Amino acid sequence: MLRKIIIVLVLILIIIQFIRPSRNISPGISANDITRHYVVSDTVQKILAVACNDCHSNNTLYPWYTNIQPVGWWMQDHINEGKHDLNFSEFASYEPARAAHKMKELIERVKEKDMPLNSYTWIHKDAILSDGQIQILTGWADSVKKTIIDKNQLPPSNRY
């Protein structure tokens, strides 16, 4: 009986390898990409590329292990959640109040070291942000937030 169970489990593992999620890869920079609408220095772009974009843009660099199911499914779900929360590739499509709020959340989560997620930095050690990188990234996000608020004359409730 145990042998049959093991055979069935192995067959299931083999079969699920053929059921793959779609990849989060875009052919280029979208018209709504944050870099097309706000100043993003090279330093900030490098930080975003290393620590943020895999989950918060339309372009993910997939490690080899995402080709193994169910790991690939878990990773794609994680990416979908990240993009739902904040997508730098679609940032300019957000309503101004939402965009300002997203920058406020980014500042809070990065300062609290909630982002990047520990599950991401376990494997991507280069995504662990130094205090200097945290200052650069949150300073940039604050600048973008202020630009959005001033440009769109948002009420004081959006300023904090």
Image (spheres, helix red, strand yellow):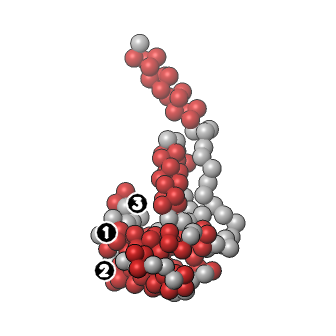
Residue that badge 2 annotates:
131
| Residue 53 place in picture, x, y as percent | 51, 68
- Dot 3 or dot 2: first in sequence order is 3
The quadrant of the picture occupied by the N terminus is top left
Q: Is residue 59 left or right of residue 79?
A: right
| Residue 28 place in picture, x, y as percent | 68, 70
The span from disc 2 to disc 1 (Cα, nearest Å) is 10 Å
Image position of 52 with respect to 66: above or below: below
| Residue 115 place in picture, x, y as percent | 37, 66
Dot 3 amino acid type: Tyr
| Residue 36 place in picture, x, y as percent | 63, 80
- Which residue in the rendered view is the most extreme toward the front? 155
**Which label sits in the foreground, 2 or 1?**
1
Query: Residue at left 63%, top 61%?
Result: 25
Q: Which mark is residue 120?
A: 3
Task: Please rate how many residues cluster around mark 2, counting C-alpha atoms within 10 Å: few if below 14, some from 14 to 19, many from 20.
Answer: few
Q: Secondary structure at mark 2?
A: helix
Dot 2 amino acid type: Asp
Query: Residue at left 61%, top 69%?
Result: 93
- Dot 2 or dot 1: first in sequence order is 1
**Picture quarter containing residue 140?**
bottom left
Q: Secondary structure at mark 3?
A: helix
16 and 108: which one is in front?
108
Q: Is residue 96 visible?
A: yes
**Picture quarter containing residue 104?**
bottom left
**Which label sits in the foreground, 1 or 3?**
1
Dot 1 amino acid type: Lys
Query: Residue at left 29%, top 69%?
Result: 112
Residue that badge 1 annotates:
113
68 and 75: which one is in front?
75
Task: Please rate how many residues cluster around mark 3, counting C-alpha atoms within 10 Å: few if below 14, some from 14 to 19, many from 20.
Answer: some
Q: Is residue 65 visible?
A: no
